[in-house]
Image (cartoon, rainbow, N blue to C red):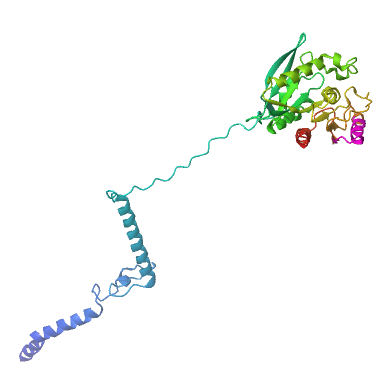
Amino acid sequence: MRLFVSTSRLLVPRPWHLMALLWFVLLVCTAGCPGTPGQDDAEQSTPTGETSQEVVPNNEPPTADVATEEKATEAASQEATSDAATEEAPQEAGAPEKAAPEAITEAPPEGPQSRCTESGLTMTCEHNTAVLQVGLLSRTVYWQTPLGTPPPEGWPVAIMFQGSLYSSKFSWVGVKNGVFGVYNQVSSLKELLDAGYAVLTPVVKGAGSTFWDTNIPPYAYSWTLSTDHSFMLKIFEDMEQGVFGRINTKKMYAFGISSGGYMTSRMAVAYPGKFRALAIHSGSYANCAGSLCSVPTLPKDHPPTLFLHGTLDPVVPVLTMYPYRDKLKKQGTPQQVVEDPLAAHEWISAAPKAIVAWFQKHP
């Protein structure tokens, strides 16, 4: 019994024992008890199999990447704040208003540059109509002047003579790949108008459905008996009177095709000194006809002459043109030949530019 009591006394805790035990527990927990402040939060909260992210404690300096990112964020925030302040800030009293950006104004569209227009495959040239009374006959002339102000002495003028059976009325509208190269014919008028030449296209008798008298007996050798001669005199008179606009009658030119080519030659032999230059297309001397052609001695003042011809022409063979060219060359008159080896009896594609260039060469 005594021993029992004595053992019980040894197991009864003393106050200093309790104090020692408490200090021991605190010491152990400080070293790493679960949930205490000394443990790494990341290690505790990261599940198995997931990538951990390093957390930088507040009392350590940030790494270079984190610092750079924070500065960029701060700069962006300041810039946004500055922009907002600029937009919201009211304008100071008396401060000049900001100039509004200048409006871009387009130049007004330019006016038409030509009397002729193209639409699809068709070229059309504006023109006027004059009806002249020649004896008992009414004869028609289609005409046009260039855009703009005429020179003080008037526009130089080119007279185009139509071919047989094909009225000069159709010289002002042409379709590509049309008969007789009509598109090239209309283009010739356009080039002349655009270059500053007035253009006249007189019509043969019968509303354009016949031909010129130049190579028709008896007029071929007695030209003054022809009504076409009277028609030409009336045209010259009306030019002087301003019927066709302001025309410079000292600068006259002539060109034409087929029957009109022969008529163009007639201008040289019947009206000496009146024309500066000629362009004869698919034709020859004034009283020739088709393959029948004999070129006489030519006048010394014969105008410079351009010949345009299709090598394959069966109506007016190109060989009938050569003697005419040769006689002009022999007497020293300027001449030139433009021949299309693939063309027949038609306006050739080189004609529009070549005619203008030839007339300009002989102002």
Up-down relation of residue 87 to residue 330 (above or below)? below
On the rendered structure, is 281 left or right of 73? right
Q: Quadrant of the C terminus?
A: top right
Residue 239 position, x and y percent, is 72, 21
Residue range corresponding to the magenta coloring? 321-336
Residue 137 position, x and y percent, is 77, 10
On the rendered structure, is 59 left or right of 205? left
**Residue ranking furthest to the top:** 136
Residue plotted at (89% across, 33% down): 328
Q: Quadrant of the N terminus?
A: bottom left
Viewer-closest of 49 and 281: 281
Residue plotted at (34% across, 54% down): 83
Residue 64 position, x and y percent, is 38, 72
Please say whether residue 53 is visible from this viewpoint.
Answer: no
Viewer-closest of 43 and 227: 227
Within the magenta stretch, is there residue 324? yes
Viewer-closest of 81 and 10: 81
